Amino acid sequence: MSLTATPVSNRTIRIGSRKSQLALVQTHWVQAQLQKAFPDRTFEVHTMSTQGDKILDVALAKIGDKGLFTKELEVGMLDGDIDFAVHSLKDLPTRLPEGLMLGCVTDRENPADALVVHEKHRDKQLDTLPAGAVIGTSSLRRLAQLRHHFPHFVFKDVRGNVITRLAKLDTGEYDALILAVAGLERLDLGDRVHQVIPPEISLHAVGQGALGIECRTNDAEVLDVLKTLQHQPTADRCYAERAFLRALEGGCQVPIGVNTLLKDDTLTLKGIVASVDGQKIVKGEVSGSPTDAETLGTQLAHQLIEQGAKEILDEITAAVR
């Protein structure tokens, strides 16, 4: 990430954020980085509640995922109330409203999923938790992959912010939770990561671990400011992942997982589509130049569609509706 900035006007730039603790930690980090790059500028944080923040008694997949955690912020940008919005990139739909774009992608934290256990299971790992252990997750992606490997667990939906979920775990409502390593680390809760789940068990969500900053397509000044936060290696990996998801016409709340590796100027993308019960799984892998990231993502999607991914996703959509 470069912190060399081109001088710009004295306009105050308004940053949009959800109100959750994790969202604010992420947004204030962005604010601090930009303030460092542009010490003479003013960056204000404006918070909003999204639909996903308000509806906490319904499973995410049943609400619908078109802008579940982003729509209100997008309306704010289009109305001119805020200038850009900071998202967990995994929450940002792959198709954005007309007039908005993905302005930059930040350096990625560990994108893996984490096992977080109740104190009584501190000597256990995923493969040694007892049969019937109650595992909390609100993600169909995690649910499908874990059911495939651990059909003897009981899976229970869990909603609320990270702190709320951990409180439910600690009171004994769950034996373990599956959360994002990156979110826990950003909240200084890295000590709660009991086990980093390997990709052989659970491929992560598209964009997980990275921040995506959305802005207006015609706001050249803001786009110039955001260039200082762009981390191209992360962006290449995430562009491939998002193209994969877009080609499958999948949203944030479907069982689609990915893993990307950028090494020696070769980008390798792995992907999986699974049925919610974990019984049907199709997966594949492609490699190529990072300059062809989106093409690689689309190529992998077509590879999985040929293996039956579309039928799996259509069944899930029909069942949820």
Image (cartoon, rainbow, N blue to C red):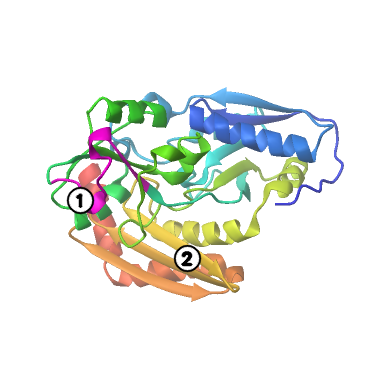
Locate residue 126, reporting x and y percent: 25, 50
Which tag, 1 or 2, sits closer to the chain's start?
1
Q: Residue furthest front?
A: 123
Please rate how many residues cluster around mark 2, counting C-alpha atoms within 10 Å: few if below 14, some from 14 to 19, many from 20.
many
Q: Which residues are magenta?
A: 114-130
Task: Classify residue 134 by image quadrant.
Answer: top left
Relative depth, front residue between 298 and 230 = 230
Q: Is residue 269 left or right of residue 272?
A: right
- Residue on which disc 1 sits: 128
Task: Classify residue 289 by image quadrant.
Answer: bottom right
Residue 98: tell me if it is visible: no
Relative depth, front residue between 296 and 163 = 163
Q: Quadrant of the C terminus?
A: top left
Q: How much space separates mark 1 and mark 2, taking CA atoms? A: 35 Å
Q: Is residue 42 left or right of residue 261?
A: right
- Residue on which disc 2 sits: 297
Which one is in front in this view, the residue at disc 1 or the one at disc 2? 1
Relative depth, front residue between 77 and 186 = 186
Locate residue 146, reporting x and y percent: 25, 52
Residue that appears at 56% across and 32% down: 25
| Residue 120 included in the magenta stretch of the image | yes
Determine the secondary structure under disc 1: helix
Q: Is residue 282 above or below residue 61?
A: below
Q: Is residue 171 above or below residue 270?
A: above
**What's the residue type where badge 2 is placed?**
Gly
Locate residue 256, reporting x and y percent: 35, 55
Residue that appears at 35% across and 30% down: 166
